[in-house]
Amino acid sequence: MTYKINGTDLTLQPTSGRWMPKDILGTDGSGHPIYSSLGEFQMKWELISPADFEQLNAFFVNTVGGSYIVAELPKFDSSSYNFYGYTGCVLHAPEVAEYFSEYVMNAILVITGIRV
């Protein structure tokens, strides 16, 4: 199983990935939280080459102007490690921390608008 964006394997798979906690939109009449139906997933690379980072940036540049993506991610709230293709997702600009020995450290890619 591999992470993919629009059917394309990432040239370097993330070091880690996680579903972010869902936003609480309010509370119901009984005091229970009401959560958003949209999820957010974050991928991280501890060390990534500039060429591999450019692939992430190219995915983002190709979505500027309102395009949505299909992201293949570990299935949300599943009892097994299976990947699932989520459609209609929004890709954020990839982020980096600093450069180290011709590599980029602590790169992050966030995908939002995931219907889970």
Image: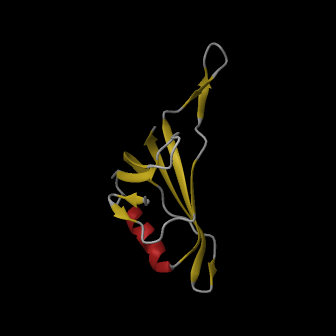
The residue closer to the viewer here, 51 or 19, is: 19
The residue closer to the viewer here, 97 or 80, is: 80
Residue 84 shown left or right of residue 28 in the figure: left
Looking at the image, the residue that sits furthest to the bottom is 101
The residue closer to the viewer here, 88 or 43, is: 43
Looking at the image, the residue that sits furthest to the front is 80
What scheme was used to colour the molecule? Answer: secondary structure
Residue 102 shown left or right of residue 90 in the figure: right
Where, quadrant-wise, is the N terminus in this rendering?
bottom left
Residue 19 shown left or right of residue 10 in the figure: right
The residue under the point 67% across, 18% down is: 31
Identify whether 65 is placed above or below 96: above
Q: Where is residue 39 in the image (x, y as percent from the top left)?
A: 50, 41
The residue under the point 46% across, 75% down is: 52
Q: Where is residue 94 in the image (x, y as percent from the top left)?
A: 51, 64
The residue under the point 33% across, 57% down is: 6
Looking at the image, the residue that sits furthest to the top is 29
Identify whether 69 is placed above or below 59: above
Identify whether 73 is placed above or below 104: above
Q: Where is residue 101 in the image (x, y as percent from the top left)?
A: 62, 86
Quarter of the view holding residue 10: bottom left
Total labels: the figure holds 0
